[in-house]
Image (tube, coloured by chain):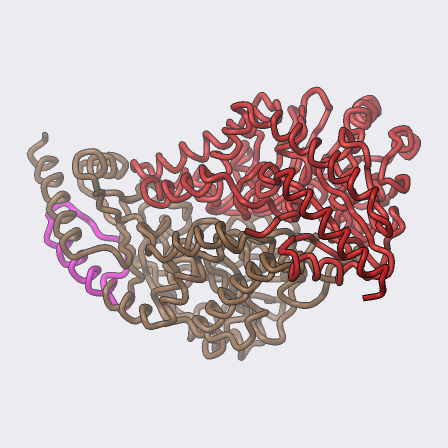
Chain colours: A brown, B red
Amino acid sequence: MPIYLDNAATSWPKDPAVLAAMAEYLAAAGGNPGRSGHTMSAAAARIVFDARENIARLFFCAAPERVIFTKNATEALNMVLFGCLKPGDHVITTSMEHNAVMRPLRRLEKDGVHLTVVPCDSTGQLEPQAVRRAITPRTRLVVMTHASNVAGTIMPIAEVGRITREAGVLFAVDAAQTAGSEEINVADDNIDFLAFTGHKGLGGPQGTGGLVIGEGVELPPLIYGGTGSLSESEYQPDFLPDKLESGTLNAVGIAGLGAAVAKLNAGDLDGIRWHKRELMAKLIAGLQDIRGITIYGARTPAHNAGVISINMAGMVCSEVGLVLDRVFGIMTRTGLHCAPAAHKTLGTFPQGTVRLSVGPFTTAAEIDQTLNALSQIAEKVRCGL
Amino acid sequence: MPIYLDNAATSWPKDPAVLAAMAEYLAAAGGNPGRSGHTMSAAAARIVFDARENIARLFFCAAPERVIFTKNATEALNMVLFGCLKPGDHVITTSMEHNAVMRPLRRLEKDGVHLTVVPCDSTGQLEPQAVRRAITPRTRLVVMTHASNVAGTIMPIAEVGRITREAGVLFAVDAAQTAGSEEINVADDNIDFLAFTGHKGLGGPQGTGGLVIGEGVELPPLIYGGTGSLSESEYQPDFLPDKLESGTLNAVGIAGLGAAVAKLNAGDLDGIRWHKRELMAKLIAGLQDIRGITIYGARTPAHNAGVISINMAGMVCSEVGLVLDRVFGIMTRTGLHCAPAAHKTLGTFPQGTVRLSVGPFTTAAEIDQTLNALSQIAEKVRCGL
């Protein structure tokens, strides 16, 4: 069995309930949800509805119809950014963002949207007051990650949410790295848009994700088309979720995601958070003891979402990753992790880092084996082998 | 076992190879394709690459990187329509389109795009010369379905492709109802954009689909974000497929789709086409013999993609569908099928129709049972029961 420490890219393995739900969907439901009225289409619609309800519950969203399914978090973020921002608007983000946020923003800059990137410190942490100071009368939106995909740093979204609400500015959170392991409360944290992916912490399959839209917030569609509703009209329906869910949903993927989220709601979330913190405490302590390793990111487990970056003196990161994979069977991700701004903040641009990320199925023994492997590599590098 | 005649909404059942490929993906590959360099990510990337190659081969596309994966055909069509059309441009479509085409076009009209809807006859057929006559110097694009999702009518795309190529106009085809059962050759048919869904004729799972882009044709992204490539840049890469595939792909769905398309390429396509034609010949002949049934659509099996619409005198379509489902266990789709323009063309707006659509797993015996059920219902209606 490989040691899989790339859960920040996609979680693995998945709970057996996920594949079981997908297989059951394909075998027995199988219709197109919300399209036809027959038994199998209704069964498919019920599965999608249950998943929507479970996700709403997980994020403390009172209205399940405000949970919009997308193919991934990137689509959800694009829906928010292209839907909210017009030429002349001002938008604020942080220097720790993934390209799922930065690339749409750089594109919007070309259309005349003004962008402020608030710098974070060298551990990736944001000072919330820096966001307040960046707000101008033209500011329409603050968009930021809940935790860095490079350094694991958990950001102060509750504080930023208070600032944006007070200022009357919309607040969008990229929860790609935290949904399913950190508690997120869209109401308490004043989050207008929560973009999430299904295939990382939530434990679902790839091809799933979505957007939770706060009460009273409007958003135009990014994609127009058939919704199975208002079939008599060539214009998009204006009610949720249909307005923002054009075309056939990934119902088989949603079936798997729904099964995973039901388990989180049944009590797994707390257990997973503590499990990840224990693993990170062990991992970070062990890494600090290995000569030649530099750690980047949040070293306090309570402020880390289960991701840490390292480099090893005398060896480029891609080579460290290759040896971990080929010699030790340990899967990590090396390079820039689609987040050049974050690496500039951490001081690891353009060389990148080796990223280690844990998941609910990672064991303490695997952390020991990984530390042991890294010690061996560091030792060989020191001896010039 | 239900009799499933709703294959135009989504095909069911799927070949067992589809679930097997998805299960194998989740168990053994499982990494994020194109993101990390490790063994499991590489295995995932290889599965996606193989699927891309198989789809390219199926549609006679010489360059697999010009096959773009999307979540559904609707996203692919939106990418084309919002990517090609600017205020002042003229676009031509037909009166048989699905809302996946009509709703984006109606939205674009509000931005100043000029739209001509070429009328089809009462069987849903298009006269290609009517497209030629509609072309103006401002015409940028012709977009049309390959076959009606209401009436099954196969459209003369080869003829329209010759006309658009000659006129220097882009040509987009919505192959949602034909991919996987009719031969489509993007090169010979002068198709610049082929939008396809994975979960109907191709036999894959929901959540898959894509766009084949012709040689020499450019398209901007609809969605910007991380691509696993050019991670040092906050700007979208300009090479295919990455330029148009932001965020994590539905690799587990693509694994299933790839398995299905590999079987089509291995020779199943011809068999499926003939099987569907035989079933449609039997179905249409039988329907013509039932007193009180009106048929809408293409009655010649060679010109029908496996879909036909009917109504029954004295009973609304939703009730016919309900009785077929509850009494006989036969799954059909009733109503307007997300295609109001098509129903206006066929003369069935706003009441709709009962739609029957066959697939590779439909049997002749099931057609007999369906005809028998419809005869019984028609008989009861005639007797006023």
Whole-percent x, y for residue A68 in the image: 57, 62
Whole-percent x, y for residue A194 in the image: 50, 65
| Viewer-proximal residue among B130 and A77 | B130
Indicate the quadrant where residue A326 lies.
top left
- Reply above or below: B182 against A44: above
Does A236 appear in magenta? Answer: no
| Viewer-proximal residue among B158 and A113 | B158
Whole-percent x, y for residue B124 in the image: 85, 40
Residue A365 in view: yes
Does A293 appear in magenta? Answer: yes
- Reply above or below: A267 against B177: below
| Viewer-proximal residue among B360 and A306 | B360
Q: Report the residue at 54% width, 45% height from top.
A: B13
Q: Report the residue at 54% width, 27% height from top.
A: B64
Q: Quadrant of the C terminus of chain A?
A: top left
- Reply above or below: B14 against B133: below
Q: Quadrant of the N terminus of chain A?
A: top left
User: How many numbered circles are shown?
Assistant: 0
Residue B146 in view: no
Whole-percent x, y for residue B202 in the image: 58, 36
A254 displayed left or right of B288: left
**Part of the protein shown in magenta:** A276-303
In the displayed image of the protein, which residue is found farthest to the left? Answer: A383
Q: Report the residue at 41% width, 48% height from top.
A: A339
| Viewer-proximal residue among B329 and B19 | B329
